[in-house]
Amino acid sequence: MRKYWKSTAIIVLIVLTIGTFYVNSATSAEQHPEFVIQTQSGDAKEINSLVLEGSYTDTSSMNYVSTNLKITADGSTYNSRSFLDQVTGQPPTMIKEFREEYRTFMRGKQSWVNLYFENNDFLAYADVNYKMGSLRTRDFTFDLSVLNKEDDHINSFTVKVPNSGELDHIFVEDIQLFDNEMILITQNIMKNDFNNETHIYTIDISNQTISNHEPIVQDPQGQGDTSFNVQIMRTNPTKANEHLVLIKREVKVIEDTESIREEVINEEIISVNLQTKEKEEINIPDLQLDNNQLSFYDGSTIYFMILAGQELVVTPYSLEKDQVGQAFSIQLSGEKDIVHGQMTTVKDGKLYLASAQMSSTIDAGVIVADLKTTKTLFKGQIALKGSSEEKHHFELYLHEMFVK
Amino acid sequence: MKNYLKLVNFEFNRIAILFSALLGITFVAQIVGVIVQSRSYLSMANEKIYDEMMSKAQFLEIFGQMSFLQIARSVWFMGPIAFCIAGVGFYIFLIWYRDWIGKNTFIYRLLMLPTTRLNIFYSKITNILIMTFGLVAFQLIIIPIEMLVMKVMVPNEFRRDMGVNEIVSSMPELGIIIPTSIVELILYYGAGMLVVSILFTAILMERSYRWKGIFAGLIYSAVAAVVLISPVFLHEFVLNGFFYPIELLILEIVMGLIVLALSVWLSGFLLKNKITV
C-alpha cells in the first residue's frame, strides 16, 4: 500500500476539495434581497395579476452580474441561473407558455412576441427568411404557420415576398388573422434610397398566396437635419385588432453648443382599418406626444398618455365612435423619480403603471387606475422586504410588465 | 482492474515532479500577486488620502473597496492558471512520446506487460484527468489562503470580503475551469476528455504508421470534429432550428459518447495490432 500513497493522496484530495466546493455552493445559494409591492393606498387585490419583470444588480462590489427576476404581489422570484435553465434560455413568458402548450408547432420559431397571433381557435406565426450567400439580391420569403387549436392541424407554407429585389431588408412588425386571411404588417427598407415604409400584405391562407399588398405609410428620408420615423402604437402583441395605429413623426435635430436634442416638428396619428385598408388621420387638438411611448391601444380605444410634471395625462380616443373622450390625469409620486422612466399597460379597462428603475436613491411606484371612472384603484411602491438597516447599493431595472 | 490501477499509480509517479512544479509555481505567483495588488491599492489610497487630502468616504466612493476580484483579474492570478493549462496540454503529447524517446525505449516494457494493452491507454488518460482535477482542487484550496493574506494586508473598511463561490460565479473565465454546477463540471471535463481521447488516437496513428499516420491522425480529428458539430450544423442550416435547446444538448452528448467509443476502439486496435517501436 505504501507504494500507492502519492496517487491515493491526490485522489482523496481531489474528491474532498471539489466535493466540498459543490456541496457548499449548493447549500449557500446567492442571497438576493426580496422585493415586495407595498400598498400605500387603495385595494391590494388590484395588483394580484400584475407581473413585473426585470433584472437586479448588486453594485456595491465590482461584480456587475445581473440576475433576472419577477416581482408580483406575492414578492419576488429570481430566475435560477442553473446550467439547464441557461440551455433552455429565458424567452418571454408568453413564448414559454406557447412552447409548453404547442410543442410541435413552436419548433424552429423565433421567440419574439410580435410574430404571433392568438385567439380562441388559432395560433398563427409569420416571419421573414432570406437566402444567405448572394449579397446583391436577397430572396425574401415569408415563413407562415397557422395552428388550428381544435384539431391540432398545422398549416405551414412559404410565400415569396413580392418585389423582393427592391428591398434591402424587411421585418415583420405584427400579424393579424381574419377568417381565411392573414395580414402582415411589415417594415420595409428599400434598397435604392434606404427609405422605410410600413407595408401591409394580405395572405390568402387556403390558396397560400398573397392576395393583396400595399404600402400604407411611407417614411421618406428627411432633408438636412430633419428625419421621419413611423412607430406602431403599443398594443397587446398577440391579440386581434381591427385597426392598426401608427404615429408618424417629423423630427428636427437641433444642435446647440452644449447638447443635441430632437424636436418634433410634425406628428400624425394614423389609424388603418386592416380589412378595408381605409386610412384615417386622428386629430386631437392640443395633443403633442412625448418620447416616452406610454400610449397604448387596447383594441378599441387609444389611450394617449403623456407625462406632465408629477402627473400622467390620459386622453382616451374611441376608434369605434371616432371620438375623443374626456382627458384626465393621474397623480404620480416623487417628481425626481418619474424621470427614470415609466411603463404602462392596459387590460380590461384598467391602466397599470410602474416605474422602470429603482435603486437605493430612486423610488419606484406602482399605480392601477380605472379608465372608466378615472379613479386610482391602487397606489404602491416597490420596496425591499424587511428593509435592512445597512445601506445597500443596487440597481433594479424593470423592462416588462404584463397582466395575467 | 488491478493491473489498470497499478499502471495509473505508476504513471502518476512519473509525473509527480512536473505536477508539483506546476503547483509550486501557481502558489508562489498567486501569493506574490495578492501582495502586489494589495500594496498597490493601499499605496493609491495613501496617496489620495494623505497627499491629495481626499476623505476616506470620498475615496471609497470613487475607487470602491478592494475585493479579491481585483487580484483574480490580474495577470498574477490568471497567468499561472494559463501556464498550468499549457503544461497539461503539452503533457498530453509527452505522456506517449517520452516512452519512445529517452534512455531506453520504455514502451517495450509497457507493451510486454501481461495485461490488455488498452490499459495503457486508460491509465494515461486517467492521469491527464487526475492532473487536471488536481490543479483545480489545489486552486480551490489556495484561494482561501490568498484571501487570508489579503485580509491581513488590507484594513477592514477598505475591503469587501467575498466567498469562493461568489468569485467563481462573477468571473466567466474562471467559471470554465471551475463551473458553478456539478452538471457543467461533468459536461466540460467530459468534453475535455473526449478531445484528449481523439488526440491520443491521433498520436497512436502516428506511432503506428509514422508519416502517413500524421495525415491519418489529422483526418481522424477533422472527422471527429465534423461528427460532433453535425447536430448543430443540421439544426441551424438544414432543419431551420427544429430542435429545442435541451434536445440539442442530449444529441450532442450522444454524439460525444459515440466519438469517445470509436476513439477507444481504434486506439485499442492500433495498440494491439499496428503499433511499432
Image: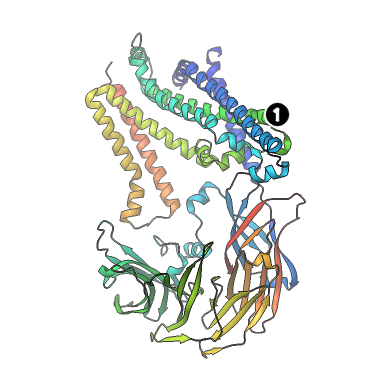
Q: What colouring does the structure picture have?
A: rainbow
Whether residue A40 is visible to the viewer of this picture, yes or no, is yes
The residue singled out by tag 1 in the image is B152
Whether residue A22 is visible to the viewer of this picture, yes or no, is no
Residue B55 in percent (x, y) is at: 73, 42
Q: Check the residue under mark 1 and report the chain it is in.
A: B
- Image height check: is A76 above or below B5? below
Instruction: Please indicate whether residue B157 sits to the left or right of residue B169 in the image.
Output: right
The structure residue drawn at horizontal position 45% and vertical position 24%, both measured from the top left corner, is B127
Residue lying at the far left in this picture: please name it: B212
The structure residue drawn at horizontal position 59% and vertical position 25%, both measured from the top left corner, is B32
Q: Which of the 4 quarters of the picture holds residue A377?
A: bottom right
Q: Which of the 4 quarters of the picture holds residue A28?
A: top right
Residue lying at the far top in this picture: please name it: B103
Residue B224 in percent (x, y) is at: 32, 38
Residue lying at the far front in this picture: please name it: A257
Quadrant where the N terminus of chain A sits is top right
Q: How many numbered circles does the render carry?
A: 1
- Image height check: is B116 above or below A122? above
Residue B181 in percent (x, y) is at: 55, 41
Within 10 Å of disc 1 (Cα), the crowding (few <14, some 14-19, many 20+) is few
Q: Which of the 4 quarters of the picture holds residue A276?
A: bottom left
Instruction: Please indicate whether residue A78 sits to the left or right of residue A112 in the image.
Output: right
Residue B37 in percent (x, y) is at: 60, 31
